[in-house]
Structure formats: C-alpha cells, structure tokens
Amino acid sequence: MSMQEPPGIDREHMAQRFAEQRARIERAARDAGRDPASVRLIAVSKTHPAAALRVAYELGQRDFGENYVQELLTKAEALADLPDLRFHLIGHLQRNKARLVAGLVSAVHTVDSVRLAQELGKRAAGRPAGPLPVLVEVNVGGEQAKSGCSSEELASLLAAIDAEPALQLRGLMTVPPYTEDAADSRPFFEQLRSLRDRHGGSERLPELSMGMSHDAEVAIAAGATWVRIGTALFGPRPPKTS
Ligand SMILES: *Cc1c(COP(=O)(O)O)cnc(C)c1O
C-alpha cells in the first residue's frame, strides 16, 4: 500500500462528495438570499481515520469537527504536520478533559455550564493562539438525554464566558431533536437564532453552529454560519461499540 492511497479511502469519491456538499451549501445560501461566504463547512470526521482527514485537507478542507477527546488527540498528533488544519470540538466535554483540548482546538462548540466555562477559561490561559473561541450549546428541544443549557440558563452562562479573559465568546450551537422530515428542524433553528437576537445579536454572537447532513439547507435558511456535516462527506459511520 502506498502512502498516497490509504486503504479504504476512495479519493475520487471523496472529492466528489466534498464538491457536492460545498455546492449544496452555496445553493442553500443563495436561496436564502445570503452570501455563500457567510456559511462555513465543518467536516465532521468522528470515527473516520486520520488518513481520511488528510485526504479532505488535500481537497481544500480546513475545518474538522470531532466529538470525542481521545480520538481528537490521536488525530491531532497524526496530522500535526498540517498547521492550518482546525479542529472543532462538537461533542460533550467533561470538565476533567478541558485541559486536554484547550490548547489544541480552534473552537469548542459545546460549553453548557458555568463550571465548564470556568475550567476552560483556566486551562486556556496563556494559549499561544490567543483566547479560545467558544460557543454555548443550547438544548432547544428540551430533551432529557441531550446536553446543552436551557434558554433560561443562557444569560448567566454567556456572562460567565465574558468574565473569562482566556475565552472568546463566538456564538451558539444546537442539535435539534432528530426528525425524519428535515423541515421539522426549522422551529428549533429559528429558536436558536432568536436567542442570539435576544442576547446581543450577531455583534456579540456572530456564529450559529447548526445543521447536519440531513437538514443543512433548513439551518442555512434560518441563519447558520457553521454547518456540521459528517455522513454526507465521509459516508456512514460504524455503529458505536462503547
Ligand atoms: C455527528 C455529528 C454531526 C454530523 O452528523 P451527520 O448526520 O453525520 O452529518 C454534527 N453535529 C454533531 C454535534 C454531531 O455529533
């Protein structure tokens, strides 16, 4: 096997998928009367090997979303020769792992408690890249099993982030309840946007991280600036074993 063609990774097929998803985002932005440059694609690479990210990087992709801290650390090490590759932590973060990611990622999308904000603020101090960009995850669907703060907790959590000099407040993130029909995500995305408008607008909260493979268009119509797409780029993920 050559280094150029990692096993199990079909470069042509990936190139086609990335081109399709970029075109899809552009079309959705135009349909919504928005500048396509205002929507950034975050390629969600969880469970896929570092070699797949490397191929995506060669196709021009720079932003990658990862859910699990250990997996992120392993990939960051394998891809350390790509200095402008950006990792976004999009999975739930436990406080005891904040120190592992604070210096490594370009953004944490999933701050959902004051205590996590404080811990991240402590661990991000002195970060060479400057203050750590963070988003607050809001559980707009109010689902029991899902992480994210409630709309009621949002104001105090935003204030706690503002109080941390090593954190840079960037916006809001959500994962709506899964529905067969992507259009059903609309009220949840609109709720996130109206929370943004109520808590300082795009001046204070420039990024709205929302939309995945099945509902990216709906999210873009509602104002998403960061869409997190996995399956449509990298194919299906193996079922979780742990
Ligand atoms: C896995 C994941 C995604 C990507 O989902 P796809 O359906 O594969 O596009 C986006 N956001 C979060 C938070 C995820 O965990």
Image (cartoon, grey):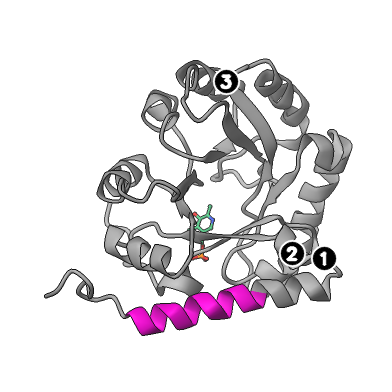
- Residue 5 in view, yes or no: yes
Disc 3 marks a residue whose amino acid type is Ala
For marks 3 and 1, the one nearer the N-term is 1
Specify few, some or many for label 1: CA neighbours under 10 Å numbering under 14, 14-19, or 20 or more. some
Query: Which residue has dot 3 on it?
Result: 166
Disc 1 marks a residue whose amino acid type is Arg
**Secondary structure of residue under mark 1:** loop
**Secondary structure of residue under mark 3:** loop
| Residue 132: image location, x then y, percent | 55, 30
In the figure, residue 186 lies in which quadrant? bottom right
Cα separation between marks 2 and 1: 9 Å
Q: Give the magenta-colored segment's residue range.
A: 11-24
The residue at 49%/61% (across/down) is 43
Cα separation between marks 3 and 1: 32 Å
| Residue 86: image location, x then y, percent | 47, 48
| Residue 155: image location, x then y, percent | 77, 26
For marks 3 and 2, the one nearer the N-term is 3
The residue at 48%/66% (across/down) is 60
- In magenta stretch: residue 89: no
- In magenta stretch: residue 23: yes
Query: Which residue has dot 1 on it?
Result: 34
The residue at 85%/46% (across/down) is 194
| Residue 220, disc | 2
